[in-house]
Amino acid sequence: MNDLQILKKLEEKLNIKFGDFSEWRGIGKNTTNRNEASSNENDIFSKPDKHKLNIDLAANQLYTIDKLGEITELFLNGLHLNTIPIEVFELKNLKRFDFVDNELKEIPLGFVSLEKLESLTLFENKIEEIPIEIIFHKTLKKLDVSGNPLTSIPLEVIGPGRDSLTSLRNYINSLSEGTKNLNEVKVIIVGDGGSGKTSLQKLLTSENFDPNESQTHGINIKHLNMKINQQSVKYRLWDFGGQEIMHATHQFFLSRRSIYVIILNAREEPNPEYWLNHIKSFGGNSPVIIAINKIDENPSYDINRLFLKEKYPNIIEFIKISCSENKGIDLVKVGLKKALIDIKNLNVAWALSWFKVKTHLENMVTNFISYDEFTEICVINGIHDPSSQNTLVEYLNDLGIILHFKDFSLSDTHVLDPEWVTYAVYKIINSKQLAENHGVLKLSQIRNILKPKEEDGKFKYPSIQLNYIIELMIKFELCFKISETEILIPDLLAVQEPEYNLPEKDKLDVIVSYSFLPKSIMPRLIVNLHNDINDNLRWRTGLVISDNILKSNAVLKADYEQKEIKITVTGSKKRDYLAVILFIIRRINSSFIGLEYKVNIPIAESNNVRVSHSHLLTLESKGISKFIPDGLDYEVNVQEMLGSLQSSRTTEEEIFAILDKLVTKLDDQSSVAEKVNEIVQIQPNFFGLGINFNALAKKYLKRK
């Protein structure tokens, strides 16, 4: 039976119809009109490109066939299959097999018989174990098993951007010298200032309650050991400062493999959803315990538990406590034990060499070490290959033993005491100089701000590390440089909105509404758009910007009460400028896990009638020029609502200038080509119809 006959048999078995790869048109999971051939030979997406094609496309079954009629690549994605058909293992010339977004629980050993197999992509399934025979398959060069509930492999080994196969092989080899279970978990305690976070941490670790407890400036970390099923588990309890202005620093440390405890002050009727969404944005579906404190002062206070549990199923316990009377603390400990069930990879095996490095770092008395020092410690303890060193550093970062970032400007420093970082940020943000200058700070002042004082000089900040602190704040968009000698921290801008003039005629209004609007989004928008800001027209919740190339202006305002950002754009290329702004907003939003938002265009003549921006784009792409929105009894013009009816055609040079702007915004380690490919994915938001943006993207890359 030849390969095509096997494929035919597979089609009948699965009741599907394959499309030959040569029939494919388009690239990327957001590309439209995938099955339509382009008539323009300069269109870079008119011909299939196996190296660029994203195969995370559910329900698109493809295959490739060589000149001899042999199948070399097969893709069975999004079919909800729980087994791999045995016919796949009869395709002896198969080099690549993708089985994405299915229900596979076990990887069959049949792949071992495929002696030409080089790439195996199995992400987004239900796989718990990876057979050794697959990991060490002699011809395999790529193995992607991310997005699976693996039980015995550290998440960092198969993390995004990693060479998973090399990492897996190095990890398995490292276990040959002996293993030991980690049995450690990070517990992050959050809540408003004065809610009792520090008091709870002290009571959990058998310290006495202090009614005059001082405010936490940054982070306090203590350890709690408890016996669970005859095993000792170490809980690392992180107590975060509750000042709202410091909430943005949480993103340094909120991570996977953590338990979260939210402390609510029963006297003040707090909003638990603020913290639940905060955790969801950075920690995903990590287990949450809600502790309602100070019930001795307000015993009748409670929250809608059923409602919150249905909306946030990762809540595992609601507990009423009183730190002042030491009540309910044992119930919190019970909740911490229960939460371990939801922590993935807790009992994963660690190589003894990993433990030696971890112990070495924990016993060091310095606040930070260099990249070279960390590498040397790894080599001394038997970890020689860079892949294993990188895996270990990511694991240690998740556990909170070190703080490490891959960015080139930050990668040389491994922080051993997280409070060393947060205390520096706290000192800078709360400095008198910064307050007096409404968020503007000269870099030369930082040395004096961080200079140890007798009353609070527990940390030292060498001159060589001052740049690290600033670069870290810039990375997390807490500040940006407004000159070579000054930085601006948007959270400390003036509250008052300044006066400004924006043409009322021919304007385009857009509203980005959120189910939860993180407080850090507007400061990050100010950071990302600071080069476009008009005459320093910026305040704590808004900014006025313009673009000379597009001859357009815009105002962005955040309304935290309504949980929305309002954008008003004017100018001859207002639609194009809006596309740039929305691209930046989407980039920021994507950094929050599961953040829900909608982009709508309000109809000026009506009361509260809004139309989805994406729906308008769909109508335009289908050639529909007018429609009646829900809530109205008259037609509206689609292109007029999108702001493009009277816009002049966007020129090639204008598009290149915008691409330059957006490529700069994508401030990461990826190549220009990868950045342009990401920008392409926001089509058709750019420039409306009639522009061959794909061909221009290729031309732009050639220039670069």
Image (cartoon, rainbow, N blue to C red):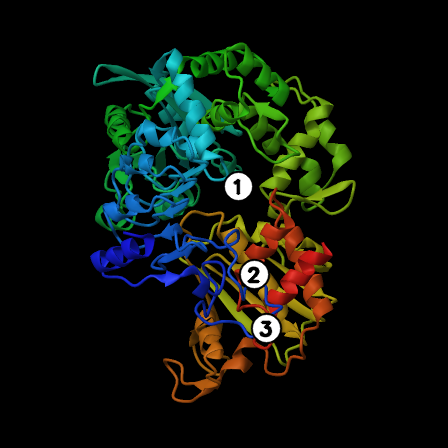
- Circle nearer the N terminus (2, 3): 3
530 sits left or right of 199 in the view? right
The Cα atoms of the two marked residues, 2 and 3, are separated by 17 Å
Which corner quadrant of the image does residue 585 belong to? bottom right
Above or below for 484 versus 628: above
Numbered tag placed on residue 692 in the rendering = none
In this rendering, which labeled residue sits more in front, label 1 or label 2?
2
Q: Residues within 10 Å of mark 1 (few under 14, many from 20)?
A: some
**Towards the viewer: 664 or 157:** 157
The residue labelled by disc 2 is 680
Give the amino acid type for the residue marked by disc 3 in the picture. Answer: Asn
| Mark 2 vs 3: CB contact within 8 A | no
The residue labelled by disc 1 is 248
Secondary structure of residue under mark 1: helix
689 sits left or right of 57 in the view? right
The residue labelled by disc 3 is 40
Q: Residue at horizontal 26%, vertical 37%?
A: 108
**Towards the viewer: 139 or 568:** 139
**Towards the viewer: 346 or 388:** 388
Give the amino acid type for the residue marked by disc 1 in the picture. Answer: Ala
Which corner quadrant of the image does residue 669 belong to? top right
Above or below for 365 versus 304: above
Q: Position of residue 309 (x, y in %)?
A: 25, 46
Secondary structure of residue under mark 2: helix
In this rendering, which labeled residue sits more in front, label 1 or label 3?
3
Which corner quadrant of the image does residue 634 belong to? bottom left
